[in-house]
Image (cartoon, coloured by chain):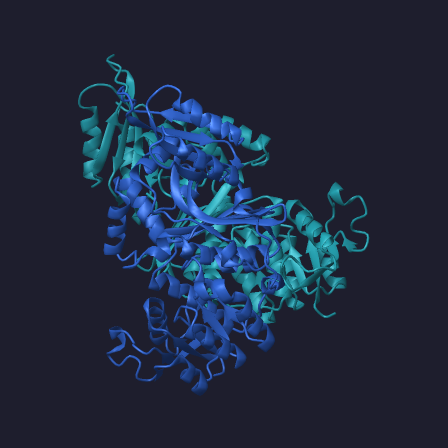
Chain colours: A cyan, B blue
Amino acid sequence: MDNIKQVAVAGLGTVGGEVVECLLKNAGGLAGRSGVQLNLTAVADPDPPPRFDDGKLKKVDRYDDVLELLDNENPDVFVELIGGVGVARQAIEKALKSGLDVVTANKELLAKNGEQIFEVARNNGGRIRFEASVGGSIPVVRTIRESFVSAELTEIYGIINGTANYVLSRMESDNQKFSEALKLAKDRGYAEADPSYDIEGDDSAHKLAIIAALAFGGRVPLENIYCEGITGISPEIIEDARRLGYRIKLLGIAKKVNGGLDIRVHPTMIPRASALAAVCNEYNAVYLQGEPVGSSMLYGKGAGGPATSSAVLADVIDLAAGRKEVEAPVYFSDTPLAPVAVEEVKTRYYIRLSAVDKPGVLARVTRILGHWEISIETVIQHGRSGEEDEEVPVILTTHKAREGAMQAAVEEITELNVIGSRPEVIRIEEGFEGE
Amino acid sequence: MDNIKQVAVAGLGTVGGEVVECLLKNAGGLAGRSGVQLNLTAVADPDPPPRFDDGKLKKVDRYDDVLELLDNENPDVFVELIGGVGVARQAIEKALKSGLDVVTANKELLAKNGEQIFEVARNNGGRIRFEASVGGSIPVVRTIRESFVSAELTEIYGIINGTANYVLSRMESDNQKFSEALKLAKDRGYAEADPSYDIEGDDSAHKLAIIAALAFGGRVPLENIYCEGITGISPEIIEDARRLGYRIKLLGIAKKVNGGLDIRVHPTMIPRASALAAVCNEYNAVYLQGEPVGSSMLYGKGAGGPATSSAVLADVIDLAAGRKEVEAPVYFSDTPLAPVAVEEVKTRYYIRLSAVDKPGVLARVTRILGHWEISIETVIQHGRSGEEDEEVPVILTTHKAREGAMQAAVEEITELNVIGSRPEVIRIEEGFEGE
């Protein structure tokens, strides 16, 4: 029966292990509700996990080396779940050159070497699918590429790192410190032993680069993405956000502004009542704005083996069913989208500073902000001690201001001898549906 | 250039007019970011709207009668946007029999005659796409059919009528009566002159039938969907919901329960903090639960010409690009999904009754509930007057109980001579992410 398609999987980790289990379970049957039959013929992993010690793989060709697999096998679809930019890249390029269709979840590789990979695909007629590289089971790639193919997208806001979102959610709902929440995330398996890739924003930047390239049609060099993590978020800032009607999220933001691309990842205050603010714990969401579709949001499990395996299998089934691409030709463009310098970005700000509690201090701060044309929206000075020279927190929010001006103003404020330490600054984004 | 595909559109109303405008604007160019060129060759409408009086359609063949169009033209894709189950059905079947690919937004036709339409498609090798029939620009059909093709979906919750959601949102945020909110919805163009199709739940039922058939693989006869509208929702109920931590939504609910299908449309209290409760005003959302995808939500503009035209064009581009279907073969099944009788459904309840304010009344009510094995979770008796025989509201919430038992209990409570009028009952659903 020529409807049976052969599949090979490289990398039997969290996601790869699930994909292989699903393929084995369905052997000879239809894949899900599709009309396609998939047959797992080969796997590659130098160190397969114990779950496969029981002989489940005995009818499958096993390789330590993925390149050896590609020398010896001829699957209809090659699934790369090794990760990283080393052997994974070699394997994908080799597979594409052999005319194989490829499915990958490798966000780092696509963010860093996407244009080279797609050029190999284009030159060899191969097809490559990568839904699982962004947002686990959330169909963000397919939605932008297919459902919104005729829409003009203008803004993207993504909660696209489950670890960071889990930590911020726990800090907010359990009044935990960052370190406590991070420990809980590790205990629950939502954070790696070294969590810096997640909490410093690099993971979000990789995913945002892929989404923005798809949505806006052009390459997004990683070095153009301004990136700031969540390690500086204190319980005090979380509490201020609550009082001001906001919630803090590590947001990936990409906007088309006057033909340029404003793209950044940083902790952001967003209105508590918005649908985006309701995305909590390990869940992810991508909020898209454009014409004529208006505001859209895709929400779901952004990580984890089972959820991500569902996205991998959907791509495998698509390719196995022989679907032609509805290619966004611009995606293949190697023209980078012109960045807007982060200094030129305009946004609202929250500022928290610790100031000596005596008359005239606020005047000096506001004079600096005024000099930099930053206009204040609210000032909250709470917990006045009454004791001379004691420091009390002052919370300000501003109207829209230039990032460059804000940075300069913060430098000047920090140098005032009545300010205890460098002010903490969080950007505010508004205008979401549901506010 | 054989990459140019011919398109004919029947029905130039709100959605059809937008689709035609988009096709005219893009004439000869790529459709959106796709690699496909679309060419509008013919339209049919007995009474084209004034927007086309200016000669825009002069290069296009125009017909009053869609069947005449199909006799004379041979487009690659035929787009049906007439609506209803009369000539629209004739046209779609005729087009499919001629081997044309068809795109439709006709939820009523698919909900009522879907299995016949799909049988014609199957017998003639035609393809039919219908993303725009549910949820405007929200990619719910594509997500279930393609992205979640290998997932086992178990529960669907949809806010799938923008008129009803707008009315309920206004009642809540502006303390308006139902009639006032409905008038506002009409003034803003979110409600028809005769709004009953929207506010009585029929529109939601049609859409839910389509989503459930796709997700669960089987026909869903409309008569199996229990349906209750929002006309009975008073400001008092809205206020009670707020105090109890809920928000009221007109929800389409479909759940697989012990091999049967629990499917219903009714006003429902859901936790205010859930992501689903943040879906307000004219926005729609579909919340899906399943394995291994977990909880997912798709959110966006559920209606309106521009947003819906985006879904129509995505389907046209798909077909024009020659995509093969990843068919869910079960969708074509004419086997109806076995319904769970609404009396057997188990859910939590809110009950509001107006009772004479004297000792023993609550005891008589609770005795009836106890007799029917309905266990009470909370009782709120507020605003005691102190004057004998005056009626005061009593608010109860229950644990999960059988619908049939609740209906019987309500009959008995209504007959008590200390109860002012029939109790108001709203079902409660919980367990959403974000709560």
Position of residue A409 measured from the top left corner of the image (x, y, whole percent): 26, 36
Position of residue A93 measured from the top left corner of the image (x, y, whole percent): 63, 62
- Left-right relation of A148 to A343: right
Q: Looking at the image, can residue A342 be seen?
A: yes
User: Residue placed at 49% from the left, 33% from the top?
Assistant: A167
* Above or below for A229 versus B155: above
User: Residue placed at 40% from the left, 68% from the top?
Assistant: B83
User: Residue placed at 32% from the left, 45% from the top?
Assistant: B169
User: Residue placed at 33% from the left, 84% from the top?
Assistant: B59
Callout count: 0
- Quadrant for the N terminus of chain A, please: bottom right
In-front residue for pair A213/B75: B75
* Above or below for A398 versus B104: above
In-front residue for pair B306/B340: B340
- Quadrant for the C terminus of chain A, please: top left
In-front residue for pair A6/A335: A6
- Left-right relation of A44 to B93: right
- Left-right relation of A264 to A124: left
- Left-right relation of A253 to B150: left
Position of residue B213 measured from the top left corner of the image (x, y, whole percent): 55, 58
Position of residue A61 measured from the top left corner of the image (x, y, whole percent): 79, 56
